[in-house]
Amino acid sequence: MAMARRQHITIFTTASLPWMTGTAVNPLFRAAYLAKARDWEVTLVVPWLSKGDQTLVYPNKMKFSGPAEQEGYVRRWLEERTGPLPRFNINFYPGKFSTEKRSILPVGDITETISDENADIAVLEEPEHLTWYHHGRRWKNKFRKVIGVVHTNYLEYVKRERNGYIHAFLLKHINSWVTDIYCHKVIRLSGATQEVPRSVICNVHGVNPKFIEIGKLKHQQISQREQSFFKGAYYIGKMVWSKGYTELLHLLQKHQKELSGLKMELYGSGEDSDEVKASAEKLNLDVRVYPGRDHADSIFHDYKVFINPSTTDVVCTTTAEALAMGKIVICANHPSNEFFKRFPNCHMYSMEKEFVRLTMKALTEEPIPLTEELRHELSWEAATERFVRVADIAPATPAKQHPSSSQRFMYINPDELKKNMEEASAFFHNTISGFEAARCVFGAIPNSLQPDEQQCKELGWRPQGL
């Protein structure tokens, strides 16, 4: 008897290593752990940047001459953190970096990176971002099922810009529109994201296995009555004001007297590093600022308290990592932190006075060792189980046949009507996104309807298009 064909899951995302951003790292782990489950054939599709854009995006002036070289780098990085895992495919689509949006945007119709016979399930990491300027095959027509995973609270970032509330209003409606016409279901990592049609809230991210190993080692030290945490408080995050530094320095500055004796280190690199450092130096507290490092670096192992007042994150990766390492976490009582409420070492404040009380208390007490169950909740294995459940990606079942018109005279099926309206809406979006002038008005990168000759050459494609 012939074996049933395994379904193909294709994960499309908006960034790739070596850019250490959430949409490069988390989809990579998702692909790896879905492959580990061995129930699907898995392909990860990431953007390819030409060398000019690589220097703008990748750290330490890192450059790749072609996709194969970058794929090798990505696979080595992953294996160093997870050990050997079942292999999955990595494909590339042409992308361009928008300096204005500080993000990579797709070029051309990226659905064509996957053959029709493998177009079973598509996972769009940041579905709004991937579909704002999409021009080509409709996602729902190409793939049997399209799942969106919303990573970013775009509205929160846009509100902080000039005329931010007007832009946020427009963006909110555009995001709802494109996710509705292109996704069957959307997973929002937390309630801190915009509400969109057919969405469910579930944290489907885990932490790098290295952090769980560090946490186990700390647990061992505590059980052997060794001193395991002998440094005080710290914060780590990209050093831009919107990543929690505004809130943190406001709290430290306003409550300097009550927080006297607090020693704190801030680790981060970014556009606002000099300003953050200058603000920290004005405080009458022992607050030191250092360049960013990998959170798994041994320098962080001995800190006891992680303070994270950021409310722009959707689910803060560094908070999950700190909890996995067995630390006490002080964070805001905010929808982005809802997932962490079940962890006894996570202390949330709603008022500033509560922040002061919890911080000073945390410095005098020891963290509660994590149970195996809670440690598992932070893992990518558990995150993958949650993803499979909420995405509802069980094998396909035959579609129900609606009665024919001869059986039900003049019957108007509401589902069919909705589908037709959706098709018309998608046709309208596709038409607008095909006009260069309209694309540019809405912020697309000029000449991004088709990949240029250089990108086609680097990707080994024919210059006429994908």
Image (cartoon, rainbow, N blue to C red):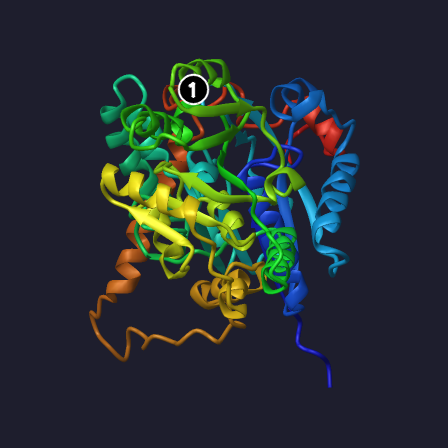
* Viewport quadrant of the N terminus: bottom right
From where the camera sits, is residue 264 visible?
Answer: yes
Q: Position of residue 368 (x, y in %)?
A: 47, 60
* SS assignment at label 1: helix
Q: Position of residue 222 (x, y in %)?
A: 58, 60
Q: Nearer the viewer, residue 30 or 315?
A: 315
Q: Residue at x 23, y 26 (%)?
A: 165
Image height check: is 381 above or below 111?
below
- Quarter where residue 417 is shown: bottom left
* Viewport quadrant of the C terminus: top right
For disc 1, the marked residue is 280
| 283 lies left or right of 195 | right
| 353 lies left or right of 134 | left
Q: Position of residue 248 (x, y in %)?
A: 37, 30
Q: How many dots with numbers?
A: 1
| 403 lies left or right of 318 | left
Q: Circle 1: is it few (<14), some (14-19), or many (20+) Cα within 10 Å?
A: some
Image height check: is 377 above or below 48?
below
Q: Residue at x 29, y 17 (%)?
A: 162
Q: Nearer the viewer, residue 27 or 417?
A: 27
From where the camera sits, is residue 50 visible?
Answer: no
Q: Residue at x 74, y 41 (%)?
A: 71
| Amino acid of disc 1 | Ala
